[in-house]
Image: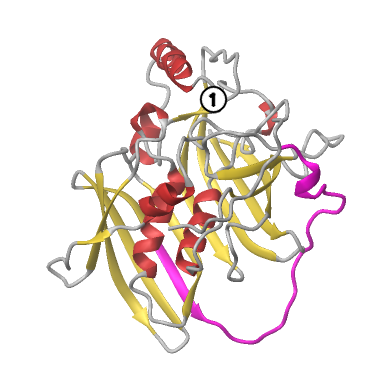
Amino acid sequence: MTGSSTHQSADQAPDHMDIDELEFMSGTVPQLLEAFVGEPIGPDADGNERFVSVSPNWWPGNRTFGGMVVAQALHAAIRTAPPGLNIHSLHGYFLRPSQPGVPSTHTVRRIRDGRSFSLREVVSEVNGKTAFIMSCSFHAAEEGDEYQLPMQEGVPIPADVPGFEAPFPFDIRELGSTEQRDDGTYLSTRRCWMRTRERMPDDPALHACVLAYTSDMTGASFRPLSLGTWGTHADASLDHALWFHRPARADEWHLFDLQALVNSGGRSTIRATMHSADGQLDLSMAQELLIRKLEVPLQFDTPPWMEREARRLVEGDALANNGSVNEEGQQEGETSGIA
C-alpha cells in the first residue's frame, strides 16, 4: 500500500522527545494504513452501512490509541461520501476505551446529502457497546477568499532538527515548547515537524486519515505545569475536533504546533495547527482531556520509545499502587493513559 520511496531521518535522537507512551508503537506505514480500512459487512436493519476494523496490538495497557479510533471511523465515513466532496471537519466523543485485537463496528448514518455538503454520523461499537461517536462533514471544492494565520517565525526547517531511528511509521523532529513567558504561560507547549517515513499512495482518504491520527499525538502539551516529565498524570481524551482546510499529503512535512489553553476542573483544553513546509495552514485541531495527577509518580529511566516491555511492568505496578486513578476516564474517555 505504499511506494518504494523512503524518507531518511537523522541518526541521532534529541535528548528529549515529547512522544507519549500511547503515541509510540512498532509498526510500518503499510500496516498503519491497512488498520484504517474496515471490511464492509452489509447494512443494519435501518439500511445504514457498516464496516468492521481491528486495531493492531501496538500499544500498552490493552488500549487503542485515540488517533486510531478517529482514523478508522473517518475512513468508514469517507467511503460513503459522494464523489467530488472532501472531508472538511469532524467532531467526535470518546465514550469507552477500545481494545487492540477486538473488532470495532462502524455504523455510518447518512444525515444529509446536498449539492455542496454532505453530513455523516458514525457510531463505533466494541463488544456491542458504543465506544466512539462522530459527526463529519464533506464539502465540494469552490473558489473563495484566501486568508490564514502564518506559521511561527524563526522555526528551524526539518533538515536542521535531529530525528530518531526506530520501528515507527512517523519521522518526527522535535522542537519543544516555546520559552516560558513572564506570567508562566507558553505560546506553544509542543512543536514538532512530522511526516510518514515512507511515501504513501495517492489516495486522499488515506492522507486525511493519517493526518487525523497524528492530530491526536499531543505528547505532554496538555499539561504545561509539568512539561518535559513523564509518569506524573493519568489522562483520557474526552473529545476531538478537526478542520481540514485544504487537501494535504501526510507524507510531506507539517509543523504540528500545540497550545494548552486551560487546565481546570481536572480537564485540559488544547488547540493545534498543522502548517506545511511552505507555510500553508492545512489543518486545525481542538481537544479536551481528563487529566489526574498520580499520587505516586512513575519513575522512567528511559525515553518513552525504549525498553517498552520493561516500562509496561513498571507502569502496571505503579498504577496498582495508585489504585483506580482513572476509573471515570475509563468509562467516559478514549483511554486511560500515563503522561
Query: In this view of the protein, which residue sits in the foreground, 3 or 238?
Result: 3
Residue 224, percent across and down?
Answer: 68, 33
Total numbered labels: 1
Residue 212, percent across and down?
Answer: 51, 55
Q: Which residue lies at the image location 46% right of the left edge and 49% below the top edge?
A: 239
Dot 1 falls on a residue whose secondary structure is strand
Give the crowd class for mark 1: few <14, some 14-19, many >=20 residues within 10 Å. many
Q: Which residue is mark 1?
A: 233
Residue 66, percent across and down?
Answer: 44, 44
Q: Quadrant of the C terminus?
A: top right
Q: Which residue lies at the image location 76% right of the left edge and 63% below the top edge?
A: 279
Horizontal side, residue 139 vs residue 155: left or right: left
Residue 68, percent across and down?
Answer: 42, 48
Horizontal side, residue 101 vs residue 169: left or right: left
Is residue 215 visible to us here? no
Against 111, residue 328 (above or below) is above
Disc 1 marks a residue whose amino acid type is His
Horizontal side, residue 24 vs residue 132: left or right: right
**Magenta stretch?**
134-162
Horizontal side, residue 101 vs residue 324: left or right: left
